[in-house]
């Protein structure tokens, strides 16, 4: 992954203060540690830096405001480092907060105190952000009640911390673009990504077969075994998409109705070629990421003669579109949590990293073939 870009300088200021006393103290201002991004002189967002070490990164202590009538005081428990977080720091993401800003779009927190007019939350509840840009790389925060939504606290910590982005993306893509039934097939690249692993597990729970494309690597055999243990029907290399072996594979399962693209470039084009075409109706390819940093090329013949549908998906936009429909987000989270309790949906492999080691976590998160998600734990 590329280095940080320009004037998004990541300042990890996570607040490490008297959390033990927060449950008993209510109104006075408290200090916390946050991870923030800063501008730096003449550097702009478009100027690229080679690594997080080239950016201004530090832990800082900041004052917390008092808890208002409609706000809550939370202690952050765990917050992952996602590609979108790094893209935001690089200045290449669709959301670019005003600087300085606290990093992190995802994580789970525990309610310590609620305002006098807060009705739906109480101390001890677990909550996650409703939207991106909240700033989760911190030890504590005072947030508006409407900025968070509760989760059951009987699911694993890392499952809760990583629930709001990747599993929700997988859930919506499997639900909203094609009418998939048990026995149908989905094909996806980036199958080892957080979204890819969630797709495998949610699809398996619904009786849907998956063809999972991964890049070749030294530990390929172990990766294939791990994905199949999650429920993957087939795991193939990128090169296989262009070989005769695909014809043999489709003797064992139907051609896919749905293709999920998190890579772009040639990989996306190859996915498109294998979509189902029945009664002059083609399947759908949904793009949710572009790790190859290359455009998606669609053959004209696929559009004209196969009537394939090419669409994009961004879970942040979905959440904003449905922000007035409380039942939509709540229903999805409840279903995902039910799968977690049943052991049908697990978090990706995670490496727990203390806040003081955030630099190491950032460096690791930007390495190729990273097998574990870096999670900052307070």
Image (cartoon, rainbow, N blue to C red):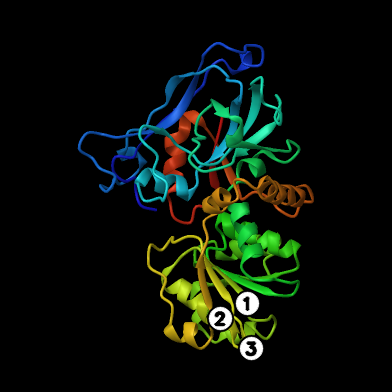
Most distant residue in the front direction:
324
- The image shows a total of numbered marks equal to 3
| Label 1: element kind | loop
| Label 2: element kind | loop
Most distant residue in the right direction:
342
In the rendered image, residue 48, in percent from the top left (x then y), is placed at 28, 48
Of label 3 and label 2, which has the lower sequence position?
A: 2
Q: Is residue 138 above or below residue 219?
A: above
Q: Is residue 194 above or below residue 108?
A: below
Q: Is residue 217 above or below residue 33?
A: below
- Residue 14 visible here: no
Of label 3 and label 1, which has the lower sequence position?
A: 1
Residue named by callout 3: 279
Q: Quadrant of the C terminus?
A: top right
Residue named by callout 1: 256
- Report the residue at 42% width, 71% height from top: 296
């Amino acid at each position: 992954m590329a280095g940080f870009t320009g004037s998004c300088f990541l300042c990890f200021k996570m607040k490490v203060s008297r959390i033990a006393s927060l449950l008993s103290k209510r109104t006075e201002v408290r200090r916390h540690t946050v991870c923030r991004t800063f501008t730096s002189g003449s550097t702009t967002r478009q100027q690229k830096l080679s690594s997080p070490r080239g950016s201004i990164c530090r832990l800082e202590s900041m004052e917390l405001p008092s808890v208002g009538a409609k706000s809550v005081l939370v202690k952050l428990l765990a917050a992952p480092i996602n590609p979108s977080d790094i893209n935001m720091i690089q200045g290449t993401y669709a959301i670019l907060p005003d600087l300085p800003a606290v990093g992190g779009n995802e994580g789970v927190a525990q309610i310590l105190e609620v305002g006098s007019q807060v009705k739906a939350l109480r101390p001890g509840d677990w909550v996650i952000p409703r939207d991106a840009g909240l700033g989760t790389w911190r030890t504590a925060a005072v947030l508006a009640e409407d900025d968070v939504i509760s989760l059951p606290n009987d699911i694993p910590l890392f499952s809760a911390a990583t629930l709001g982005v990747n599993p929700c993306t997988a859930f919506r893509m499997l639900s909203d673009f094609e009418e998939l039934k048990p026995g149908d097939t989905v094909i996806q690249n980036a199958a080892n990504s957080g979204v890819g692993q969630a797709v495998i597990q949610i699809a398996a729970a619904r009786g849907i077969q998956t063809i999972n494309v991964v890049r070749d690597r030294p530990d390929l055999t172990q990766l294939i075994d791990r994905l199949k243990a999650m429920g993957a029907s087939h795991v193939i290399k990128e090169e296989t998409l262009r070989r005769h072996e695909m014809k043999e594979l489709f003797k064992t399962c139907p051609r896919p109705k749905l293709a999920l693209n998190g890579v772009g470039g040639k990989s996306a084009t190859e996915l498109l070629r294998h979509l189902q075409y029945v009664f002059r109706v083609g399947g759908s390819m949904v793009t949710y990421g572009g790790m190859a940093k290359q455009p998606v090329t669609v053959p004209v013949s696929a559009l004209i003669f196969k009537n394939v549908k090419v669409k994009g998906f961004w879970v942040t936009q979905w959440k904003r579109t449905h922000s007035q429909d409380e039942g939509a987000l709540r229903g999805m989270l409840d279903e995902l949590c039910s799968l977690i309790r049943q052991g049908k949906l697990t978090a990706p492999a995670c490496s727990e990293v203390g806040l003081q080691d955030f630099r190491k976590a950032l460096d690791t998160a930007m390495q190729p073939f990273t097998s574990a998600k870096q999670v900052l734990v307070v």
